[in-house]
Amino acid sequence: MSAITLTAENFEQTVTENQIVLVDFWASWCGPCLQFAPIYEEAAVANPDVVFGSVDTEAEQQLAAAAQITSIPTLMAFKEGTLVFAQPGALPKEALAQVLTAVRELDMAEARAAQED
């Protein structure tokens, strides 16, 4: 499955109703964003168990502001509706694979317990 377009209307529902969601914040004028796009799209097709979403920061300026995006591309990962990873910059294919593995293996019960301490 390829990446889906996320907007202010479907962002929260997508994040909360899916086990794992990766979100790429990008813009059409951003060179690194355009370089990262095929890597992200390839990962989306190769990982059908994960929802890959894309937010065009030009079209969705309020959503980008709400997510506190200050640099693009920025990749965010949500698991069980909780933000578990956020990093600006284009990732190479191997690094994106590592993020996916880490998010899949993350024990959310342990993560939530650690947040409470």
Image: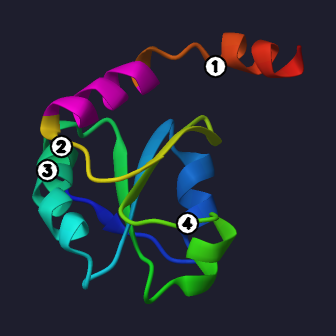
Identify the residue shown where x is 29% and y is 24%: 98
Q: Amino acid at mark 2?
A: Ala
Tag shown at residue 69: 4
> Which secondary structure, mark 2?
helix
In the picture, which quadrant includes the C terminus?
top right
| Alpha carbon separation for disc pair 3 and 1 | 27 Å
Identify the residue shown where x is 63% and y is 83%: 62
Q: Is residue 9 visible?
A: no
Q: Choose between 53 and 87: the one closer to the eye.
A: 87
Is 97 magenta? The answer is yes
Tell which tag, 4 or 1, sits nearer the viewer: 4
| Alpha carbon separation for disc pair 2 and 1 | 23 Å
The stretch of residues the image draws in magenta is 94-103
Q: Earlier in the sequence, mark 4 or mark 3?
A: 3
Q: Earlier in the sequence, mark 3 or mark 1?
A: 3
| Residue behind mark 3 | 39
Q: Amino acid at mark 3?
A: Ile
Tag shown at residue 108: 1
